[in-house]
Image (cartoon, coloured by chain):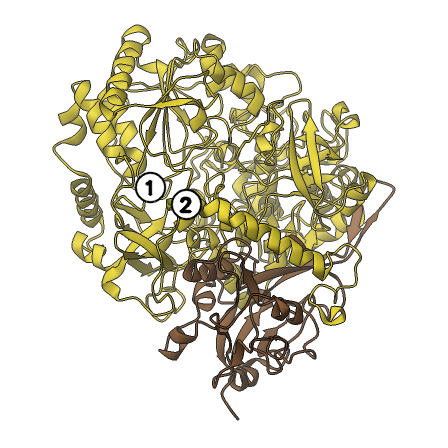
Amino acid sequence: MAKQYAFYFDSNLCTGCKACQIACKDKWDLDVGVTWRRVAEFGDGEWAVHNDGTYTQNISSYYVSVACNHCSSPECLPNCPTEAITKNEDGVVMIDESRCIGCRYCEWACPYSAPQFDAKRGVMTKCNFCYETVSQGGVPSCVAACPTRALKFGELEELQALYGTVSEVAPLPSASYTNPSLVITPHRNSAPVGTGELANPEEV
Amino acid sequence: MNENAFLNDLVTDSVMSRRSFMKWSAALGGTAALVTSGFEFAEAVARDVPIAADNVVWSCCTVNCGSRCPLRYFVKDGAIIRVETDNTGDDTFGMHQVRACLRGRAIRQRIYNPDRIKYPMKRVGKRGEGKFERITWEEAWDTIANKLRDVIDQYGNEAVYVHYASGPAGTTITRAFFRRLMNCLGGFLDYYGTYSTAQIQDAMPYTYGSNVATNSIEDMANTKLVVYFGANPCETRMSGGGMNFSVQKFKRQGDARLIVIDPRYTDTAVTVADEWIPIRPGTDAALVNGLAYVMITENLQDQEFLDTYCIGFDREHMPEGYENEDSYKDYILGTGADQTPKTPQWAAEITGIPAAKIVQLAREIALTKPCYIAQGWGPQRHANGEQSVRAIAMLPILTGNVGIQGGGTGARDNSFKISVAAFPTLTNPVQTSISFYTWPEAITHPTEMTATTHGVRGKERLEVPIKFLWNYAGNALINQHSAVNETRAILEDDSLCEMIVVIENHMTASALFADILLPDTTNFEKMDIAPNGDTSNMGYAIFTEAAIEPLFETRHIYDMCQEIAKRLGVEEAFTEGRTVEDWLRYVVEQTRENNPNFPEFEAFRDMGIYKVTNPGSPSIALKSFRDDPVANPLPTPSGLIEIFSPRLHEKSQTWELPEGDVISALPMYTPTWDGLEDPNRERYPLQMITHHYKQRTHSSYGNVEWLKEAAPQELWINPIDASARGIEHGDYVYVFNDRGRTRVPAKVTNRIMPGVTSLPQGAWYTPDANGVDQNGSANILTLYRPSPLAKGNPQHTNLVQVEKA
C-alpha cells in the first residue's frame, strides 16, 4: 500500500491553547480568516438548581485540534472544477494554487472546512502537512509547537498500530464521509459524533 | 452536502449553520487586509524549507505570565520572518523542550505592529486624550530631567514614584534600570506587593511565618488526592515554561484523583480534573469552614499534628495572653462569639455547593493520605482574599499534610530553579513604601494615608503627594488598575501628578495618559537574560539576543536612563562605565561566583538555553519543621503554625478600617461589599470574576490580530442567566454597574456556574464618546477599594448586570 501521512491527536493532553494554530499561521504567513489548523471546543451537560441556592451539574468539555486530514476519500478533490487538488504519493492532499480559481467548492465539500479561502490572493489554501519539511526529515510546525505533546505525525498504519483506529469524536463529523487519515486518542469525557455541542463556533 | 458538514453534525440548535460559518470566515478575511495594511510582514521565502542555523537568533517571550519561553527568530535582511521555539535535545523530561504558547508564537505581530510608538512625543491636548506631538530625544530628556529636578527640589524624593509594571517581567536587567537611576538620584517612593499576589504574599506569613509555596509539582506523583482551590496551571501557565506540562505528567504518573474547586470549568478541569466543584467567587473560606465542621464533628482531624505544630486550634492550645479569645474550634462549632455553627448547610447556602457534597468532600480530604492541597492566586484577589488564603491553608493543617511527601501547605505549587544574579539596583535611600495598589490616593490625598489606614510602611504617614510618575512598560496606570473611570479623573487633572512619563512599545491605554511618551525598543531588539519559568524538576535560563536593529527612533531603556543621569550629574554612578552587554557579562560573572557550573557568557550565548535537571529530590515545603519543630521553628513569633495569629489580633484592634472590612486573628469567612450578601445584588445580581485568558498575558499581546481571532474577548455567562436575558451565544451584551459599562460578545457556556460571569482581564480600554468601553475591558467595572490587610486589589469581587446590546 502507498504511504499515507497522518496526524495523531491525544485529546486528553490538549488544553486548547492553540499554539499549533498560531505556529502554523506564523510559518505560512496566514492572514486572519485563513486558519489551517483549528481547535474545536466540545461541550455537554446541564445544570440543576436547588431550593437552597445550590447547584449540581454534569458538565464536560474537551478540545479537538484539527487540520486537513489528508483523507483517503477527500471530498475536496472530486469537487474541484479545475483539478487543482491532487493527492500525492505520500497521501498528502495538495492544492496547486496556479490552477485554483478560488471558487470555494472544496471548502463547501470538505466536512472539516479544511480548505481556507485566501481573499487577498483569491485562491484556496490549506494544510500541506509541511510536506517539504517532512520530506527532509523535519516535523510539521503544529506538531513541533505543542506544549503538551498532544500532536504527533507519522504514517497512518504505524500510528494506528500504536494508538488504535479512532478517527472521529464529537464535535468532528463522522469519519465515514471522507475516511480521514487521523488517529485520535479520545478524551476521557469524549462523546460520540453527533452529541453535545460545538462550544466555540466563532473560533473555528 | 449539508448533512455531512462539520457543524451541521451537531445536534443542538445554538450552533451556527455551515453557511453562516463560512460567511463569518469571509467577513474576517476582509478585515485582515485592513489590519496588516499599515505594516506588511517581510516576505518569507521558501517558507517550508528549514533555514540555515546562522540565521537563527535566540530570544524569549518576557511578558508577565510567570513562565519564560524561548523563541528562535529566523532573521532575513534585518527582519524576523519566522518564529520557532525550543528544539534542543531529545525532549527527555527534565531536559525537555520549553515550548512557547500561542502568544510567543504570534510575537511577530507584536514586533511589527501598527501600534508601535515610533518617536518621542509630548502631550499637546488634555491628559488622556491621546493628542501628542513629535519631539526630539534631546527635548524629551531635557524636559524629564528638569522636571525631575524641580520635583525633587520642591517636594523631595518621596514625590517620585516608580509605578508597578511587568511588561519585561522575564528580563534580568531591562526591568531594573529605573530603580538604579532613581537610587542614584536620592531614591523614590517604592511600593510593596503586586497586582498578582498581594493578598497571598501578605497573609500567608501570618500562618506559616513566610510566604511559603507548597510542595514541588513533581510531588503530585506521590499523592493520592489533589485538591485545587482556584488553581489553574493548565490555563494560566499553559506554555512550556509553565506548570502545565509537568502537572499533566505527574498527575498521570501518580494517578491521583484531582478535584478542581473553581467558579469556572477551567482548562485545568478539562485536562486533569476528575471532578469539578463549582463555587461562588469569594466564598472559599465558607467552604473550608463547612469542611472543617465535618472533620471536627466526626473527629477526622489530625489532633496530634495540631497539638504539636500549631497554636490556636482549640482552647488548650491558645497563645499565651489570648486564652479568652475564640479558638478555631470555637469559631467552627459556633461556641465562640458569633454563636454560628459552620455546618455543611450553612456553607452550602453561601458557596452554592450542596451540603451532601461538602460532607463527602470533607471525608475524602481527611481520610485520603496523603492529600496535596494547593491554591492559585484567584481566590486571594478578592475583598476578603487574605481570609481565603489562610482558610485554604487550614485544610492541610487540619489533616496533618504539612511537611510530608504527597502533602503540602495549601499554597501554590513550586518548581526547582537555578539562580541568576540580580542586577545591582543599589539601595533606595527612601525607606517609605506604599501598597502597589494605593498610588492614586498617594496622588490625591497622601497625608490621609497612614500605617494603620493604608498600610504605609517605613513611615507613620505620607507627607507629600506623588508629583512625578515613571511608568515603564506597564499598563497599570489605567487598564490593569481598578476603577478605570475613577482613575481616569485623577490622571486627567495634571495639577495633581504633574509629570507622567510613559515608556512603551505600543500605544496602550496607559500610554495615552503620558505627558512625555518615549518609544522603547522591544525585547527582541534588546540583549538580556531570562531565568526560569515553572517547570517542576528543571531550571533554565535563556539568553535573549537583540535579533534586529531598533525600529524607527526607538531607543534602549538603558540609553534613556543614561541620558537623564547625565543631565542630573549621576551618569558615572549609574553606568559605572558599563554598556548593556557589560552589565550582562557582570551578571553572568556574579552568577558563576555562586554557581561555577553556569556557563560563561559566550558559551551561554551560543547555547541559547541552559537547562539543569534538579540534582536533588522534589522539594517538600516545611519538611525540616515537620521533622523537628524544635530545632527548625517557623519564622512566626511562636515558631509554630499560627492558626490564631496574635499579630493579626493586634492589627484587628489597631488598624482603622472602612465599615464592613475585617481583619481577624483566625481565618474566617467574611461577607464583603459586592459579595453575595451585598444589598446591591438586587440591582446587580451577577458576580463577575476576571480570568486570565489565552489571548493575552494581562494586557500584553492585546493588540495582536492572530490572537484576537484565536481567542476573542468574550463574557462567559451561564445558559440559565443568558436565557433569562434573551442572550444567545455570540450576541453583543452590555456588562455594567454603577462604576461603568462595557460592550462585549457573550460566550454562553455551561463552563461557568449560574449567577457568575467572567470577563477575561486585560482587554484594552477603548471608550466611546460616552465613556462606554467597546472592548470588554474588565476594570471599567471593578471598584478601587484596597483589601483590609494587604491593601491589595480585589479585582474578582464585582457585582454586575448584563443586558443584550
Q: Are marks 1 and 2 in contact (CB under 8 Å)?
A: yes
Tag 1: amino acid: Thr
Please say if B335 is above or below A37: above
Q: Is residue B108 left or right of residue A116?
A: left
Disc 1 on helix, strand or loop? loop
Can you say which quadrant of the picture contains the C terminus of chain B? top right
Q: As shown in the figure, which amino acid type bears the numbered disc 2?
A: Arg
Residue B522 badge: 1
Give the chain coloured yellow: B
Taking A108 as reference, is B174 above or below it? above
- Quarter of the image for residue A101 reads bottom right
Which is nearer the N-term, disc 1 or disc 2? 2
| Residue furthest to the right | A51
Residue shown at 64%/67% (left/top)? A187
Name the residue located 42 percent from the left edge and 28 percent from the top edge: B511
**Would residue B580 appear left or right of B227 to someone viewing this image?**
left
Q: Which mark is residue B110?
A: 2
Q: Report x, y in % for residue B523.
A: 32, 43
Circle on res. B683: none
**Camera sees residue A82:** yes
Q: Quadrant of the N terminus of chain B?
A: bottom right
How many numbered discs, if any? 2
**Picture colour for chain A:** brown
Q: In the picture provided, is B264 more to the left or to the right than B236?
A: right
- State which chain disc 2 sits on: B
